[in-house]
Amino acid sequence: MMEPKYDQNGLVPAICQEARTGEVLMLAWMNRQALQRTRETGQAHFWSRSRQQLWHKGATSGNFLEVCEMRMDCDGDALLLRVRPAGPACHTGARSCFHRPLPLDAAAAAGEDRFGLDELFAVVQSRQNSDPETSYTARLLAAGPDRVLQKVGEEAVEVLLAAAGQGRARVLAEVADLLYHLLVMLAQQGLTLAEVEAELAARHRGAA
């Protein structure tokens, strides 16, 4: 059986990727014991460098990672785990640990910060475990699916009314509201923007 090349601490980096969408969820570390336990159980086990002990992902939170496939890179010094997550991969409650945008260079950092759907969805995901008293998103999610669906419906109507003659600025504002509430609904349903993009890509390929 092939084995990875462990570093001087007996560890190898393991990248976890959502098996269906390809979304990168997290980076952790494995030693021989963690790799063996992952093979035996079919669930991701890692080595916690901070606690210096074996870590069964999801043992406390319930957010297990079911491993569909494991691969090594060409040099054997990194692992790729294709997984099916049972919940958020990040301890913040976000779907992926990679939800913090980083400017490409100093010029980009000095300019206007980009804030698109990916960034907004990361914020929505991070609010899932926030205090409803201080976060509208957390309060909306805590109210349950019916309330979220009601808000999506209300905002969709507002978009139609705005587009019927209330002017460009109003249309933009109402579309922004609708997109936000759609992202809240996605998070509540356990879906991601990556899955929506995969669906759109599949339709595009089919149309071609």
Image (cartoon, helix red, strand yellow):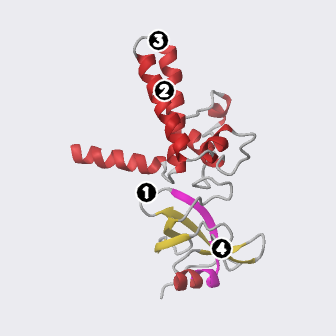
Q: Nearer the viewer, mark 4 or mark 1?
A: 4
Task: Kindly indicate the quadrant of the structure image that contains residue 56.
Answer: bottom right
Kindly identify the amino acid type of the residue bearing the numbered disc 1: Thr
**Label 4 crowd (10 A; few <14 / some 14-19 / many >=20):** few
Q: Is residue 101 visible?
A: no
Callout 4: SS:
loop
Which numbered tag is attached to residue 21? 1
Residue farthest to the front?
146
Q: Which mark is residue 59?
A: 4
- On-image quarter of the C terminus: top left
Asked where in the image residue 10 lies, by quadrant, the reply is bottom right
Residue type, label 3: Gln
Give the residue pinned by disc 3.
Answer: 166
Side (left or right) of 135 relative to 82:
right
**Residue that appears at 51% across and 70% down:** 81
Disc 2 to disc 3, how far (Cα)?
A: 13 Å
Q: Position of residue 128 (x, y in %)?
A: 64, 49
Residues in magenta, as a range: 24-35
Q: Are the two marked residues, 4 and 2, in contact with CB atoms closer than 8 angstroms?
A: no
Q: Is residue 26 visible?
A: yes
Q: Are marks 1 and 2 in contact (CB under 8 Å)?
A: no
Residue furthest toward the bottom?
A: 1
